Amino acid sequence: MLQWKYQNQEADIVIVGAGAAGGVLAKELAEANFTVVVIEAGPTRDPQHDFASDELSMQQLAWNDTRIVAGNNPLTMGHNNSGRGVGGGTVHFTGVFLRFHDTDFRMKSLHGVGEDWPISYEDLEPFYAKVEKDIAVSGPKYFPWGNFNGPYPYPERDPLSPNTYMFMDGCKTLGIVASVAPLAILSAPFEGRPPCINRGFCNQGCMPNAKFSTLIQHIPKAILAGAVVIDDATVTEVMSNATGKVTGVRFTHNGIEYIQRAKIVILSAYAVETPRLLLHSATPQHPNGLANSSGWVGKAIMPHSSHDVYAKFKEEIRLYKGTPVLATTQDFYETNIHRGFISGYSLHAHGARPLGIAGELASRANIWGKQLRDTMLDYNHYGRVTMVGNVMPEYCNDVTLSDEKDHLGVPRAKITFSYGENDLRLIDHAVEMMSNILEAAGGKVEYVVPDTAHLMGGCRMGSNPSKSVVNSYCQSHDVNNLFICDASVFVTSTGANPTATVMAIAERTAEYIKNHASDCL
Ligand SMILES: Cc1cc2nc3c(=O)[nH]c(=O)nc-3n(C[C@H](O)[C@H](O)[C@H](O)COP(=O)(O)OP(=O)(O)OC[C@H]3O[C@@H](n4cnc5c(N)ncnc54)[C@H](O)[C@@H]3O)c2cc1C
Ligand code: SF4
């Protein structure tokens, strides 16, 4: 029988999900002396025992439960976008740690598309700085784009990989500015953790602990401050009472159902599971799902477009060497209406491991048999560039409940996604630029592989309760003791990797709860 400290008591705060946002919230709120219980569906792993330099076995770091996908461009769900276990997606993320630009928060005002965020870049600025300092982000002395130009707390990574030098050469030839990427990966020792040893298994979980994750950073500090973390426990429902307030969560561990009562519930279960839980927690007071009087729960989910372009080089590149992403350009990040689309993208020199490439070529580019074998025999000669492209928020791209149920009796999530016109024009432009860079570096482009990465949206923040789910502090418009704080609150997707922003938003929400908890109890 599961025993936990607040088993028969009402905790101050229960947090669902111990990922990027949940980890930050648990640490900050436990250190502020709230009684905090974190409930996490997956296990707590020990990097030195549970991580292996093995692409196949480390697929288990992902949320691999069946999800139904639909739409014109159905998303591949699993290792490429969702994590499961203490640390969430940060356990196998690549560590690219970029801030959004001020223009990202004002897409509607500037271009009449998408929606404005209820916060500005300036609102998040101190929280970006805090997160970067807390985890010792390494990066260049001068970062050429956006509102923050460095320096980062730790020096930029060195040495770089051959794929990175190839990318930088190609960019230089074309007059494109490139920079070493800011990374949540150590370039020097920090808090007893060693610097990166460049073996490139970051997407398999980092065994030496050089890469930040909330598993090794925020959750241990939260526990030290008194938080209780219940792992291998899946929340199936957020409970609410006749007045409409939330009262706690129902969860299952080892086939037995438990309840954790709490004064405040925070959902940090990511862009699919958070909307799914809210929709599944409907009551007569909340007939369309909890926090869903607007009808926006589950709506406007956004992946990043993430096509990969491969070129073959005479010399060896060896894509497995080093941290996957060590260089980037944001020269095409801001809107330039002459290009025929709004917003933009980042391009990363992006290493890859052999099984990943073989699987990608076979499943997404239809390369099979002799051609696949010959390509893999020449693996060492391939270089790769990847895009992180803005995808516009559309109401019709959504998470809903399907008719099929999982083993706990909860309807499976159905995720519907189709690219819009703007997204497709942006992808065409990025693919052309990636190809130009690879060719300028001396390669011959052979494969363009469509892909997506990251997920955002589904419970977006906003000032207007009829068009959004939470306010700018991630507090539900409908239920004031319910907070939703993870990648689901994003209003636009932007052309940058999202986790720095997920964590900055979580820091801001934690500060708000610290100062205003009594208002919502
Ligand atoms: C392969 C890969 C590479 C990536 N690379 C980068 C990168 O380089 N840079 C970047 O910025 N971002 C990257 N990301 C994205 C990053 O991982 C996410 O943006 C981030 O983890 C989202 O944080 P979150 O708190 O919203 O959710 P998560 O970190 O996913 O945490 C959600 C947690 O909730 C748990 N959970 C879900 N449902 C329940 C439930 N019902 N009960 C209990 N627990 C539940 C999950 O198990 C999970 O641990 C990458 C992701 C992947 C998968
Ligand atoms: S390359 Fe560096 S960050 Fe990546 S797994 Fe190896 S030590 Fe960790």
Image (tube, rainbow, N blue to C red):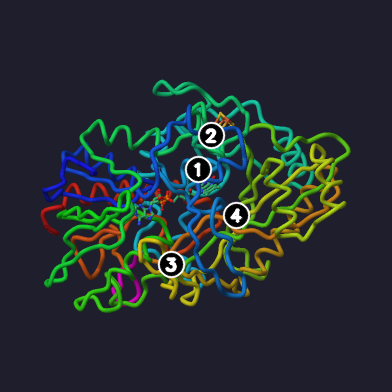
Disc 3 or 4, which lies upstream in sequence? 4
* Residue at position x 80%, y 57% in the image: 367
What's the magenta region?
459-468
How crowded is the residue under tag 3: few (<14 C-alpha within 10 Å), some, or many (20+)? many
Residue 404 in percent (x, y) is at 44, 72
Query: Would you name the residue on which mark 3 appears?
Result: 412
Q: Are marks 1 and 3 in contact (CB under 8 Å)?
A: no
> Which residue was labeled with disc 2?
139
Magenta stretch secondary structure, dominant? loop
Circle 2 crowding by C-alpha within 10 Å: few under 14, some 14–19, many from 20: many
| Amino acid identity at mark 2 | Gly
Q: Circle 4: is it few (<14), some (14-19), or many (20+) Cα within 10 Å?
A: many
Disc sitting over residue 388 in the figure? 4
Q: Which mark is residue 156?
A: none
Tag 1 and tag 2, C-beta contact below 8 Å: yes
Asked whether mark 1 and ligand 1 are closer than 8 Å, the reply comes as yes
